Image (cartoon, helix red, strand yellow):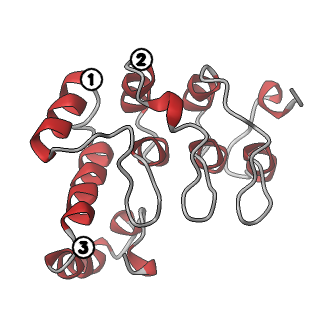
Amino acid sequence: IPEDLSSQSLYSSNAKEKKEEMEKFLASAPEQEKIFQRLKDEIYSGELITIETISNFEKENKIDLKTFTDSLGQTCLHIAVDAMNFSCVDSLIKNGYAKDMVNKGDNVNMTPMHIAGINFDANIYDLLLTLKPDLKLKDNEGKTSKNYLEENDEVEVPKKFLRDE
């Protein structure tokens, strides 16, 4: 995927232009990228939130979401956390999908916990902590999820999330 068409580009201010670029890219993209883009669309739109909708998506696309990634190395948990889709994250955890994904880094070693630190939502962050993730994992910038929490100026992060384990 071209860099300017990464995960959040469809939701930016010039969304129509980016959507047209994405459609052009997907027209010649490998089938796996097309499936992953549909996955992203369904997670961001809130369609993919229950174990039933997740299971149906797997069956329809003949994939295993536990191991399915895009060319950026992102899993469905990366996307659900980025979309701040609590119901999807909850379903992925409750049904065993997320335990192997929570410590998986993408192509820049960013885990779902890193994304949760950047796009802080206390409920999602707390939910991910139930998986007992490795909070010492660093991305390519040498940052942990806690580093991102500490740098987050958008929201007030409760002290309980900033304590050292």
Q: State the CA–CA distance, disc 3 to disc 2.
A: 33 Å
Lower sequence index among marks 3 and 1: 3
Secondary structure of the residue carrying tag 2 is helix
Q: Residues within 10 Å of mark 1 (few under 14, many from 20)?
A: some
82 lies above or below 129: below
Q: Residues within 10 Å of mark 3 (few under 14, many from 20)?
A: some
Residue 100: % across, % down: 51, 34
**Quadrant housing the C terminus:** top right
Secondary structure of the residue carrying tag 3 is helix
| 1 and 2 marks in contact (CB < 8 Å) | yes
Residue 88: % across, % down: 36, 31
**What residue type is disc 1 on?**
Ile
**What residue type is disc 2 on?**
Lys
Q: Which label belongs to residue 94? A: 2
Residue 139: % across, % down: 71, 58
| 3 and 1 marks in contact (CB < 8 Å) | no
Lower sequence index among marks 1 and 2: 1
74 lies above or below 34: above
Residue 36: name its quadrant: bottom left
Residue 70: % across, % down: 37, 60
| Residue denoted by label 3 | 19
Lower sequence index among marks 3 and 2: 3
Number of the front mark, 3 or 1? 1
Identify the residue at horizontal 65%, vertical 48% (top origin).
Answer: 114
Q: Residues within 10 Å of mark 2 (few under 14, many from 20)?
A: few
**Quadrant housing the N terminus:** bottom left
| Residue denoted by label 1 | 51
4 lies above or below 91: below
Identify the residue at horizontal 40%, vertical 36% (top origin).
Answer: 85
